[in-house]
Amino acid sequence: MPDLYGAIDLGGTNVRAIVAGLDGKISGDDRRPSRASDGLDATIEALLASLDQACSEAGVEAGGLRGLGVATPGWVDTERGVVPAAPQLIGWRDVPLVEMLQERLGITALLENDANAAALGENAFGAGRGTRHMLYITVSTGVGAGIIADGRLYGGAKGSAGEIGHTIVDPSGPRCGCGNNGCLESLSSGTAIARRAAEAADRGDSAVLAGIREREGRLGARLVADAARQGDAASIAIYEEAGRFLGIALANAVNLLSPEAIILGGGVMQAKDLFLPRAEETMRDLALDEPLKYMRLAEAELGDRAGVMGMIARLGQQAG
Ligand SMILES: [Zn+2]
């Protein structure tokens, strides 16, 4: 049997655990609710149960794994293996997750932020294969990113690099959760799309959106996409605008980093037909020719496996 490693992607909704070799071949795979709303202990229990299930599928004891990598949302202290706090994980505050897991399982563990893990995954096993300089962007409830520079994750001074969601693309734009105005996240995330749709319904700009809100009791980005595909002009305009602002951020990223590839993932990509053409057009219009020449824009390939595959890649870097 080849050396087997464990990887866990812990989110606010689900936890996923896999057992795999460093070649990325998966021999055990489990996914279940992370019970994040039930607090720290329940979530740790779900995480361990998920790993146990993946291990038994692979025919290995958790203690027999060669290493364990865990991805969690928000900023993490990778050096100390501590999760400071994450809005998605209720009751987590300065949790020494690596130490807890090492003690419980008797194997070495390491920690990474989930967007960085997904970047590593796409770089090693997905759409960014073969590149040494790559940017991964996830457009979801929020907007996050991971930077691969010279084949390694670029964390900056203390690991908090990659916050493209809080780069400002319109200083007169709406207020962002971080306190500034016009951050990319406040203009192109799923949350931003839903908010703009609610505003359009309030203003009476779209009877279709008002009708959907009445029927469904809410207006999520996916419902706005449905309305746009049925020809609702306001919904089409909302996605086009989200695309334009994403394009501005992409152009800035191209000029700053000159990556070989920018890989786009996240739930909002399910509506890529509605915003990606405008995003790419804007990026090509605004970015400098020279870095643009060597760059390709591509869709993420690994879907919700990106995080766990990234942790396998990370363990491989550590081992090799
Ligand atoms: Zn912000």
Image (cartoon, helix red, strand yellow):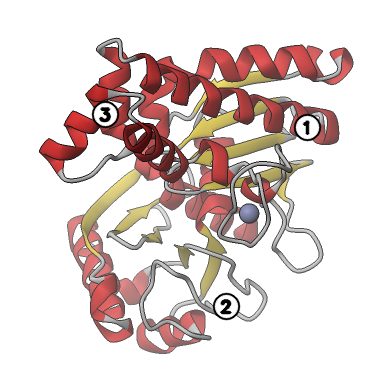
Vertical side of 177 occupied by 172: above or below: above
Q: Residue at x 61, y 46 (%)?
A: 145
Which residue is nearer to you in this view: 34 or 191? 191
Question: Ligand 1 appears in which quadrant?
Answer: bottom right
Q: Position of residue 37 (x, y in %)?
A: 26, 74
> Image check: 250 left or right of 231?
right
Residue pointed to by mark 1? 252
Q: Are marks 1 and 2 in contact (CB under 8 Å)?
A: no
Q: Earlier in the sequence, mark 3 or mark 1?
A: 3
Q: Position of residue 53 (x, y in %)?
A: 19, 64
Q: Residue at x 31, y 79 (%)?
A: 44
Q: Amino acid at mark 3?
A: Leu
Distance CA(mark 3)–CA(mark 1): 33 Å
Distance CA(mark 1)–CA(mark 2): 32 Å
Vertical side of 25 occupied by 273: above or below: above
Q: Label 1 crowding class (10 Å Cα cut-off): few <14, some 14-19, many 20+?
A: some
Residue pointed to by mark 3? 209
Which residue is nearer to you in this view: 196 or 259? 196
Residue pointed to by mark 2? 81
Quadrant (top left/top right/bottom left/bottom right) for the C terminus: bottom right
Q: Nearer the viewer, mark 3 or mark 1?
A: 3
